[in-house]
Amino acid sequence: MAACDAEYNFTLIDIGAYGSQSDGGIFSRVIGRAVETGDIVFPPPEVIPGMAQEMPYYLVGDAAFPQRKWLMRPYPGRSLSLQKSIFNYRLSRGRRTIENAFGILASRWRILRSVMVAQPDTVEAYVSACVCLHNFIKSETCGSRFYCPPNYVDSENNGVVNEGNWRLEMAALRGVGRLGANIATRVAYELRDMLANYFITREGEVPWQYHKVTSIN
């Protein structure tokens, strides 16, 4: 499990959980706990242009993760209001970054595509090495140009997503599961509602094709 920045560099990583565990449970055991205990510190809240109240920095997750003040997940359900649907659309654009980061990693380091015949500690070392090498090559100007050229990752034009070339080199990654329950604080839900309102009033129009889709749901 990992988090990345906007340049597809991994910033947080947790290796070694059992595959039978839920993503929410894996997240809570190391990364989530480190945030709650203060071992991982976010920058202080800031005022977003056009919003009077300060907003905290937060991670972007999908429906498998719990809603927190520092972790935004999509609104659940299908028959959502336009505002909630647009929020989910905006959030999914952010989540696409980590999907591409994993895609780059798995397509470039082919040892990650198949079963590794090794002891668990050795496998963890292999994965850690791949992540470190990924970040190192991405930091090198010359190496990054060949390792991850512009057309290698997803791009978007007027709401139409053009899939990156890494998807052509490997099978689609499995979707993550959902948590059985998501109990968040009232403040966390209020922050999500504020962001949803901000996205629909300040961040420009969502492509017309998406308005047609959300009006059906």
Image: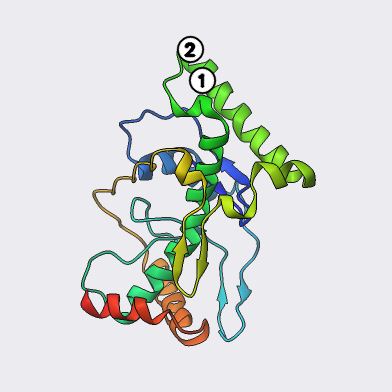
Camera-nearest residue between 199 and 101: 101
Is residue 154 or residue 184 the one in the foreground?
154
Q: Which residue is under mark 1?
A: 123
Name the disc covering residue 150, or none: none
Which percent across, then down, holds residue 65?
Answer: 38, 52
| Residue 55, quarter of picture | bottom right
Q: Position of residue 186 (x, y in %)?
A: 36, 69
Q: Are marks 1 and 2 in contact (CB under 8 Å)?
A: yes
Residue drawn at point x = 39 percent, y = 76 percent = 193
Total marks placed: 2
Which of the marked residues, 1 or 2, is nearer the chain's N terminus?
A: 2
Tell me the kind of residue under disc 1.
Val
Q: Is residue 163 visible?
A: yes
Secondary element at tag 1: helix
User: What distance separates the C-alpha of mark 1 from that of mark 2?
Assistant: 6 Å
What's under tag 2, amino acid-wise?
A: Ala
User: Would residue 138 appear left or right of 116 to someone viewing this image?
Assistant: right
Residue at the spot of label 2: 118
Q: Residues within 10 Å of mark 2 (few under 14, many from 20)?
A: few
Question: What is the x, y in percent for residue 126?
Answer: 57, 23
**Foreground of the two, 174 or 62:** 174
Q: Secondary structure at mark 2?
A: loop
120 vs 156: above or below: above
138 lies above or below 76: above
